[in-house]
Image: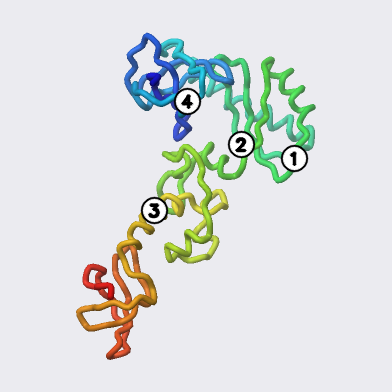
């Protein structure tokens, strides 16, 4: 099996595999590699390991070199140039009267291309805009339309929980989130309570769902007959977080709450 290292090009971004070649590279090292976008600098996040070819995109590209002080300085310069490019692009968008919400800009490492990210509720004909931007920046231009979740990931921020956005912190890809997940977690279905800043259902509903599913497997289901310290009864509700069970007792017709470990399934 080929030996590879995992490289990430942005915080909470997807991990790509590269051939370390002659280098012995530890996690945390910055490397220069060739990608479909051109030369890029990335951080090694997983050390050398063997991966089956079926999980790789072949042919595997090699690490060109380790990044030094000069390369890191160039990254800082690229970020400054990207920040300066935003108002220039916004001015051209307004001049053309396009319905676009400019989100961010990014120069590739070798500055062979500048990418502008935007959101829009409709398809945008930006061909003339690209021509004007190419004349201003004297390089290749790419305009990339993204969704509102991608916008939140790109810009970052603080969520309703008071912590940094999950998508901008550690989620390297988005998974489908459904209203059923909110129901299964006994959450309020008020959209303002279960939606993130992006306006979509919160990503945490997805990755917390497995904990609820595992907890419920060990607990009786609503309607199930059980035996409690106070006698027989039927389950009316369960709380996977507190690990408690609401039981309507047969003899007294009262409903009581019991720790899950005190309830035996009939």
Label whose residue precedes the other's in the sequence (2 or 1): 2
* Residue 68 in view, yes or no: no
Front tag of 4 and 3: 4
Above or below, comparing residue 175 to residue 57 in the picture: below
Label pair 4/3, CB-CB below 8 angstroms? no
Point 45% across, 24% down: residue: 53
Image quadrant containing the C terminus:
bottom left
Q: Secondary structure at mark 3?
A: helix
Residue annotated with mark 2: 103
Give the Cα separation between the discs numbered 1 and 3.
37 Å
Front tag of 2 and 4: 4
| Residue 137, image x, y percentages | 68, 18
The one of 60 and 180 positioned closer to us in this rendering: 60
Give the Cα separation between the discs numbered 2 and 1.
16 Å
Front tag of 2 and 1: 1
Point 76% across, 28% down: residue: 129
Crowdedness near tag 4: few (<14), some (14–19) or many (≥20) residues, C-alpha within 10 Å: some
Label whose residue precedes the other's in the sequence (2 or 3): 2
Point 38% across, 73% down: residue: 222
Residue annotated with mark 1: 123
| Residue 151, image x, y percentages | 57, 40
Give the Cα separation between the discs numbered 4 and 3.
28 Å
Label pair 2/1, CB-CB below 8 angstroms? no
Q: Which mark is residue 210?
A: 3
Label whose residue precedes the other's in the sequence (4 or 3): 4
Point 36% across, 11% down: residue: 23
Give the Cα separation between the discs numbered 1 and 4.
34 Å
Query: From the viewer's perspective, is 93 left or right of 73?
Result: right
Label pair 2/4, CB-CB below 8 angstroms? no
Q: Which mark is residue 56?
A: 4
């Amino acid at each position: 099996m080929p030996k590879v290292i995992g490289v990430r090009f942005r915080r909470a971004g997807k991990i790509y595999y590269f051939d370390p070649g002659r280098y012995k590279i530890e996690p945390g090292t910055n490397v220069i590699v060739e990608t479909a976008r051109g030369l890029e600098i990335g951080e090694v996040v997983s050390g050398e390991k063997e991966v089956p070819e079926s999980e790789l995109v072949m042919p595997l590209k090699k690490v060109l070199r380790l990044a030094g002080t000069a390369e890191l300085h160039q990254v800082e310069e690229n970020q400054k140039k990207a920040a300066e490019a935003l108002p220039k692009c916004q001015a051209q968008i307004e001049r053309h009267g396009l319905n676009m919400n400019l989100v961010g800009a990014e120069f590739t490492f070798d500055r062979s291309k500048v990418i502008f990210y935007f959101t829009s509720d409709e398809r945008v004909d930006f061909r003339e805009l690209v021509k004007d931007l190419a004349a201003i920046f004297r390089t290749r231009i790419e305009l990339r339309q993204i969704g509102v979740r991608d916008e939140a990931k790109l810009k970052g921020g603080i969520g309703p929980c008071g912590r940094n956005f999950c998508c901008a912190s550690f989620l390297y890809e988005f998974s489908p989130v459904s209203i059923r997940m909110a129901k299964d977690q006994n959450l309020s279905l008020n959209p303002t309570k279960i939606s993130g800043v992006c306006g979509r259902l919160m990503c945490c509903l997805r990755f917390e769902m497995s904990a609820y599913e595992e907890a419920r497997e060990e607990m009786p289901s609503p309607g199930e007959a059980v035996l409690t310290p106070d006698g027989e009864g039927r389950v009316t509700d369960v709380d996977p977080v507190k690990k408690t069970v609401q039981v309507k007792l047969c003899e007294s017709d009262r409903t009581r709450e019991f720790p899950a470990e005190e309830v035996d399934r009939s």
